[in-house]
Image (cartoon, rainbow, N blue to C red):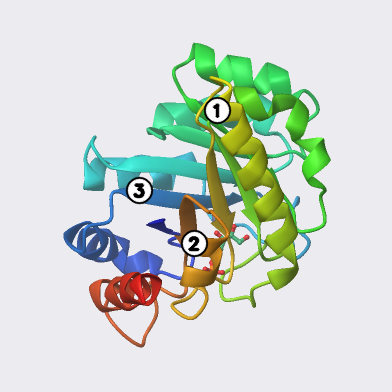
Amino acid sequence: MQITPSILTADFCRLGETLDAAIEAGIDWLHMDVMDGNWVINRTITFGPALIRSVRERVGPDVFIDCHLMINNAEETWEQYADAGVNMVIAHIEAVEDFPGLISSLHNSSILSGCVLNPDTPVKDVLPILNDLDLVLVMSVVPGKGGQSFIPEVEEKVRTLRKEIDMQIENGGRKTKLMIDGGIKFHNAKLVADWGVDVAVVGSGLINNNGTISENLESITNAMET
Ligand code: DX5
Ligand code: ZN
């Protein structure tokens, strides 16, 4: 299971050094949590395309960057994130009117497409578009901030999506990646890897005051190998 850091818990005044440390530790995928101060329940604002552009400049062209859009108007503004240098736009199925339309716009611009399900959004909502998606993301916290507790009840959704994606691939369909996001630490990384997750977002479990990113990444990686 691949680990991608969310930079939400980083000190934004030292973000360049944090990014350097992440790349140094072997990270090659960054997860950018965009919140518009409106869509998420606690009305948080995080950052927009300008910061993502600086991140892209700092890490260079080879690091994969996704943007997790927790915003009201992803259908109108996704191009700003594409222009800022992301490789993938991950939007919430709860916030997008015409998801198939968004997917084709993204694909026409060579941007990979992802769809997020909140903890209480059923899998059936994403099945009609699953084969068009490059990634499906199951939230294991309520979107809005880093450092929240993991919601284990999403296990059934993750396992169901794992089965659906495996069947889709067996029938020659798209190799949609399965991502989980929220509350992933060294103590539950193996658990979700065993559920069949391909990529886990880790924010406060990687970027925190207890250890370096490389130490934290190592403890998560070791935990997955036990
Ligand atoms: C929450 C974000 C998550 C969060 C993960 O709305 O989408 O990506 O930052 O942070 P941790 O790993 O600390 O839960
Ligand atoms: Zn996220």
Does 199 appear above or below 75?
Answer: below
Q: Earlier in the sequence, mark 1 or mark 2?
A: 1
In the displayed structure, does residue 6 sit left or right of residue 220? right
The residue at the point 22 percent across, 58 percent down is 26
Q: Earlier in the sequence, mark 1 or mark 3?
A: 3
Ligand 1 location (quadrant): bottom right
Q: Amino acid at mark 1?
A: Glu
Q: Amino acid at mark 2?
A: Ala
Can residue 133 be seen here? The reply is no
Quickly name the residue at label 2: 193
Q: Secondary structure at mark 1?
A: helix
Quickly name the residue at label 3: 29
Closer to us: mark 1 or mark 2?
A: 1
Closer to us: mark 1 or mark 3?
A: 1
Q: Secondary structure at mark 3?
A: strand
The residue at the point 22 percent across, 65 percent down is 21
Outermost residue to the left: 24
Residue 120: x percent and y percent?
82, 57
Quickly name the residue at label 1: 170
Q: Give the quarter of the image for residue 130.
A: top right
In the displayed structure, does residue 185 sit left or right of residue 16? right
In the displayed structure, does residue 76 sit left or right of residue 225? right
Does 197 appear above or below 110?
Answer: below
